[in-house]
Image (tube, helix red, strand yellow):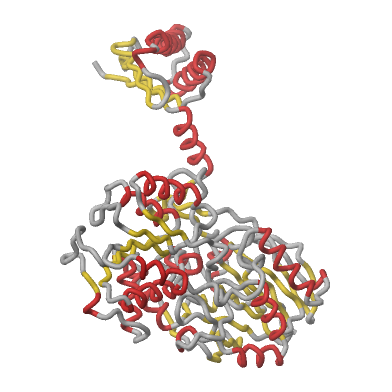
Amino acid sequence: MDQVRIFALGGLDEDGKNMLVVEVNEAIFIIEAGLKYPDTGQLGVEFIIPDFSYLIENKERIQGIFITHAHDDVVAALPYLLKQVNAPVYTGALTANIIHEMLKKEGIKNAKIHRLKRCSKQTIGGVKIRTFPMTHAFPDNFGLAISTDQGYIVYTGEFIVDYDMLQKEYLCDLNELSDIGKKGVLCLLCESQGADKSGHTAPKHRITSLIEPIFEASEGTRILISCYSQSLFRIIEIIELAKKFNRKIFFHDKGIRELLKHLETMKYYRVPKEMEINEKNFSDDMEDVVVLISGNGKNLFRTMTNIANHEDAHVSFRTSDTIIVASPIVSGTELDASNMENEIYKEGGKIYTLDSKTVLSMHPSSEDLKMMLYLFQPKYYIPIKGEYRHLYVNANLATKMGYSPDRILILENGQIALFENKILKSVAQRLELEDTMIDGKENWDVTGVVLKDREVLSTDGVMIIGVGVNHKTKEISNGPDVQTRGLIYLKDAEYIIKEVGNIMENCIEKAVKEKRYDNLTVRAEARDKISKYLMKETGKRPMVLPVIMEINS
């Protein structure tokens, strides 16, 4: 019988950075390659991607990388993976176009991208694989069923169940899911982010009925509306409302316009030309228009704050404006969202915020998840995607559906579930993983030491002490020159600056006198003594950087 191993390189007990690995004998299949955005303590880090070490070590065994849709949390780490692993990518038609653009920007050539139909069957690396259509905020979304002689390994992807969904590119086919379930499912992997929400997500994911009265009451005045740029379903709702009220629309962010062009290319949706105002023709004094402001996470709320503070290049807030926050405040964005609201209220503005309890993101709630368990009837259930509390609630749902605890696996990143003869054999084996923190360029990944240095700089500042010495005699020829940033106000602490200079001079002179002078050793000694003195005098531990310049006279 096939040996099956399932583990995650990211996405468990965290929000984002999703990456799963399914091994059928020697064949490796990668599902998703996403990033996550940093916590407030990770200073200067742009984003975080999974640890690819295991995949690089075993790259000859990788048969394919499956990307279910084009949200950052499942696709944005793909370029960094493809630079180190040359493996074919399998995805939907729309997502394939977006990946092509992404790889082009990163200078990645010769990547093999295969377009899959949402409902398809193929054999890859000797393993039969089925895709099945699922409804999500992004068109062309699909789930995955990997066939083994122990049963299917099913990954639903991100989804909701919406019986009112009519657009083909968003449709879910429950018959296809049921058919896979009848053939036998060894293990089902379902996302967990909305597991604590009761009922079905639909129709609470739709916002039209909530914001239509606001559009109606704002006749003749400008509407500024914010929305996460990857919530394409919601953005189309906003465009359709603007069309209904005969309002022209200005897209503040170029990125969303690029996404809409991809939709037009696929003939999924087209913004009527007559209602769109381009950047050249847009004027800040226009009334009766809709300005759609989009972005990701905190950046969206920061853009709104800039508009309220009259610091944006295109739009300045006016008290007559109606502002709608159609992007519910999610974990990690609370502070930026509060700052935005404060600035708008200071300007005397009207703001309508859609509550995250009223409007749900397009992730499965409890009844959606129960339906997956009912249709697939898996032998084992693995909650994925979400913080630990989400995984725990998702696991509890399975117990309510009659699953015993030994058939439900809450794994950690790197923990391997091994299946043999249709039985879970072990979860003892683990991979040691470290987050890869990206700071500007991927080859400049940030270590814990760098982050600690940044934390010190942000809280206690820095002191630089420069001294020039004669290269031959080691006598001090100029300095010491002391500079600080973020520590003390120099004019109020001249005695501290003087004493720091004295400590530096004494360390050099003592080392020369005792005939043990070494540039590196003396700097380390001075750093230690100066740090202790500053702690005593100021109560702070700044970064201390002694510099000894040896000059040829």
536 and 552: which is toward the camera: 536
Count of labels in the image? 0
Pinpoint residue 536: horizontal percent, then vertical percent. Answer: 54, 14
Pinpoint residue 70: horizontal percent, then vertical percent. Answer: 45, 72
396 and 344: which is toward the camera: 344
Viewed as shown, does residue 499 lie left or right of 376?
Answer: left
Task: Judge whether 57 appears above or below 131 on screen.
Answer: above
Image quarter of residue 301: bottom left
Pinpoint residue 520: horizontal percent, then vertical percent. Answer: 44, 24
The residue at the point 68 percent across, 64 percent down is 391
The residue at the point 44 percent across, 65 percent down is 76
Task: Judge whether 400 appears above or below 387 on screen.
Answer: below
The residue at the point 45 percent across, 49 percent down is 336
Pinpoint residue 272: horizontal percent, then vertical percent. Answer: 26, 81
Viewed as shown, does residue 27 lie left or right of 426?
Answer: left
196 and 355: which is toward the camera: 355
Regarding residue 46, the answer to whether it shows in the image is yes
Q: Name the residue furthest left.
A: 281
Viewed as shown, does residue 245 lie left or right of 493?
Answer: left
Which corner quadrant holds the N terminus? Answer: bottom right
Regarding residue 384, the answer to whether it shows in the image is no
Which corner quadrant holds the C terminus? Answer: top left
